[in-house]
Amino acid sequence: MQHHMLLNLFVNFLPLVSEAILRAKMPPKRPKSAISSAGSKGRAKGKKSQSPTLVEKPGHPEDIFPMVLTSATQELFGCLADEDVTGESPYKLLKKDDIIQDIKTRAAVSDFSPVKQIVLDYPEDELLLVYDRDFTYEQCFYLVLTPEAKDRILNPPEPETSQVLENVVNKTPEPKEWISLGSELEIDEESIKETREKLWYKFSRVRRKFGVPVCFSDRNTADAKDGYLECASYQDSRFSIKQMQRDCGMQAVPRLQSSSAQTQWKFQRNIFTQYVPRELSDEEKENILQFESLNNFCNSVTPRVLQALQQEEIMNGFFDDWKALGAAAEDGDWSGKVSEGLMLYQAFTDQKYTKDKKISSINWHPTIYGVLAVALTEQKEERTKDSTTFVVTPSVILFYSFSDPSIPQLLLECPDDIFAFEFCPSDPNIIVGGCINGQVVLWDISAHVTHLLGTQPGSKKVSVSTDTFDLDDNQENKTPVVRYCAVSALESRHKAPITDVQWLPPTFEVTRSGLPVENKYNISVQVVTCSPDCTIMFWDLRMQRLLSHSATDRKQSVDQKTQMTPYSVPDTFKHLDRTWKPLFRVSLPKIDTSGEYAPLKFSLEHYTCNGNTGRTTEEDNENDDGDSSKVIPDYSQLRVPSAKTATILEDVNTKLYIGTEDGEIVHTDWKLEKDDSGRLQSAKPLHCFNIHHWLVNTVQRSPFYKDIILTTGGWNFAIWKEGVMDGPIVLSPSSEQVCTSGCWSLSRPAVFFIGKDDGSIEVWNLMEKTSEPAQVHAHITNAKITCIKPWTASSKQHFLTVTDDIGMVRVLEIPKVLYVPTRNESLSVKKYFELEEERLNDFLKREELWAQQKREAEELKRKTEPDKPAKSLEVNEEVNMKEYKDYMTLEESILKGIGLWPAAADKQNT
C-alpha cells in the first residue's frame, strides 16, 4: 500500500516539475512553438522530421516514447496504475480522438502535448499505451508510436524451434555396443552373494498381553552413555560362526589433516588405518650422501654438536639458578605471585582399621622423622547402625611412617574411641588421650622407639599386647600393639566425650586452687582436658604424698604382677590406673543468663620463665640444654610437692580462650575464687562473643605472637588479640562451605590454612590479600576435612597433613613461597594487627556515638510531643463507642424486621 501511495505522488508531482523546468530553460522558443502549432498544417505534412520524436532519450527503441501520466490523466483515460493496468496486464488501447480532444482542452498542460504531432500523424484510430511497472525506460508508461510495434507487442512471434525440440526429446537414444575392459571381474568380486541359508526368527507374546494399552514414559538421556542406549554385542556360547577370509580395501596417505566441526558425536564406530611410511630408495640415499654440500655441512656442524653434548653432560643448561638461590622470596618480589601450590607427598590408609571410621585427631612425632599418629573414631551413621548388631570394633591409634607407608608401624590400644591426644613435650614416649566416654588415657611407647626408628624392622624382642584381640593371622607381619598404662576412674571422668586435651608447659604447674607455681622438675606433669559437659579439668600425673610411704611395696607388687600377666604393660603410671582423679574442675557459667557453656576447644598461653622466679632466661636455656642430655625421671617416682613450699608465679597468664558447641568464643580465668562461705568456685567468664554460630573446631595461638589466636567454626574464621575485649580484630566473610579446621604456618607469621567441608584448602596470606585467600586448592579430598597439622621436617622441607572423615591421611609438601618468610614479615604482620585493633576501636566509638545520637533524638521527640498519645487514645475511644452504637442500632432494626425482637422488652421499656 505504501508503494502505491509513493508511486501516485511521484506520478502527480513529476509533470509539474518538468513543466517548470522547461518554462525556465526555454523562454525564447515559446512564440516559435506557438506559431508552428497554430498554423502551417501544410508544412507539418511535408516535414515529418521536425516532429517531437526527435526529443527522445537514449536507451529505448525509436518506435516507443516513455512518458509520465498524472493521476488526473490516468482517471480520464481509465489507466490507473496497479488497478486498470498491472504488471500482468500492462496494455491499454487509447482512442486517437480522445487524445486529440485532451490536447485541445488542456493545451500545454496535457501529458500528451510532447507527442501531439505523432498522434495527429498516426494512421490508425487506437494507440497502444503500456504500463512500465519496473521503469525499464525510466518512466512508468510508454506510448507505442507505430502500428508495427503495436502488433509486435500485442502478438509476439512464437519460437520456430519448438517442433524440432519436441521431436528431439521424444527420441530414445539407442544403446551402444559394450566393449569389455576387465572391470566386470572386479564388480563380480565385490558384489555380495548369499552363501548360506537365511535364518528364521519367531517372535511370540503372552496371550494375556494381547490388546493391553502401551504406556510410554520419559527417559533421562543422562542415564545412558553419550545420550543413547547402546546394545553391545556379546558372544553367544550356544553356537559360533567361523569367519572366512574377508577382503577389505583401504586408502592411506602420509599427510595428516586436522579439522573440527560443531557437531555431536552420537554414533561411535571403531575405525583403523594401516599405512607404510614413505622412504627413500637405496639409490637415492647413495646419491644424497655423495653431495659435497652435505659433507661440508656435517664437517662444520659436528664439532659444535659434540661440544654441546659434552656441556650437557657436565651441567644442566636449563637449570634456573635464580630460583635455586632463593633470593626472590627473600627480596619480596615473588611473594604470593608464584603459581606453585601444595603438592601431594605421601598418602596413608589401612582398610583393616580405617574402614567406616573417621580421623578425629592427628599429631606428628616430636623427634622421629616421618612418623605420625592418628586417632580413629566411628562415624555417626555406623555407630547408630552397629548399636543393634553388637559388633565390637577395636579402638586404636595408628602410627604411620614414611619408611613403610603401606601398613601401620604401631597400634595403641584404647578403651574407647579417642577424640583428642597429644605427645608429652618433655618425653615424646608419653602420650595422653581423651576418650569418647570421658576417661583420660596414658600410654608409654618407650619399648617401641627402636621399631619406629626403623633400626630393627620386624624385631621380635619388642613385647606387645598381642593377646588382646586378633589383628592378623600372620604372626610375622603382625603390627605391634601397645596397651594403655593407665585410665582415669569412671566416677571422676567427664560426662561427655573429651574433645580437647593439652599438656601444661614444663615451665610451671598449678595447685588445687588453680594458682600457677614453679615447676621444680622442669618437665610436663599436668594435663588439661575439656568436654561438652561444661567443665574443664586439670590432671596431675604424679603420685600423691599420702601414698608415698608404700611406694616401694607397690612397686615390688607391680613387678611381680608384670611377670605373671600375659601383657607387657609398663608400670610408669600404675599408680594412676583406675584411681586417677582430676586435680580440680573449672565450670563455665554463662555471664548474663542461667546455664553453662559447653567447651569443645581451648587455648592457653605457653609461659616462658623470666626473672620473677629468681632465674634468668639464659640459665633456663642452659638448664634445658643440659636436661636434654640427661635421662628424664620416671613418672612413677615423682611426687606432688607441698603447696606451702611452692613459689607462686605472678606473671603466668591464667586466661583461656574457649570455643563452644554453639559457636561462642569465651574468655575466662581458670583460677578458682572463694565465695562468701569460703568454698572455692569458678569465676564467671570475662567475655563471650557469638561469632561462628556453630561448632568451633579450632582455637590456636600463633607460634609467633603469643596474644594472637585463630578460631574457626561454622562458615567463617576469626583472629583475636588477647587484651582486646571488644571482638575479633579480623573476621572473614561467610563462605558457602563450612570451615572444619584451621592452623597457623610454622615458618611464616602471615600465612595460615583453612580446611573446608567440601575437601578444599584455602591458603591465606595477610601480606598479599586480607579479603580473600591467596590460593584455593580444591578437591584435596572427596570427603570432609577433619584435621590439618603442619610439620617442619627440615629448613628446606615443610609438610601439611590433611585428614578426612573416611580415614585417609594425605601429607602435602608446602612450596618454598609459602614457608620462606619475606623481609621484615614479622614486623609487618604485627603492624597490620595493630592497625586492625585501631580500626575496631574506632568502629566501636562510632557505633556508640550513633547509638547515643539515636537515643537523644528519641528523647527529644518524646519531649516535644508529650500529650499526643493521650489525645489519640481519647479519640480512639470515642470512635469505638460511636461504631458500637451504630452496630447496636443496626442489630435492633434487623431483629425487628424479622420478628425476633422481644416484645416484652419493648413493653418494659415503654
Image (cartoon, rainbow, N blue to C red):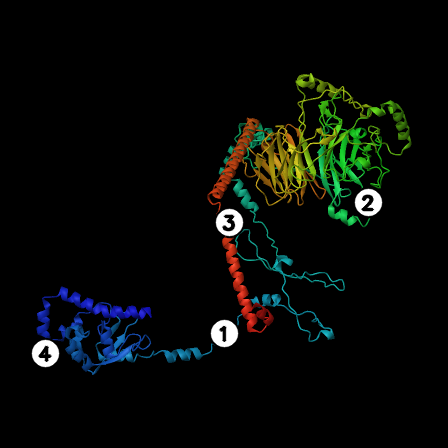
Looking at the image, is mark 1 or mark 2 earlier in the sequence?
1
Query: What's the residue type where badge 1 is placed?
Result: Lys
Mark seen at residue 41: 4
For disc 1, the marked residue is 176
At mark 2, the secondary structure is loop
Horizontal arrangement in the rendering, residue 740 relative to residue 492 (left or right): left
Q: Hey, which quadrant is residue 592 in on the image?
A: top right
Q: Is residue 782 visible?
A: yes
- Mark nearest the camera among 2 and 3 is 3
At mark 3, the secondary structure is helix
Q: Are discs 1 and 3 less than 8 Å apart at CB?
A: no
- Mark nearest the camera among 4 and 2 is 2
At mark 4, the secondary structure is helix
Q: Is residue 270 visible?
A: no
At mark 1, the secondary structure is loop
Horizontal arrangement in the rendering, residue 192 relative to residue 563 (left or right): left
For disc 2, the marked residue is 392
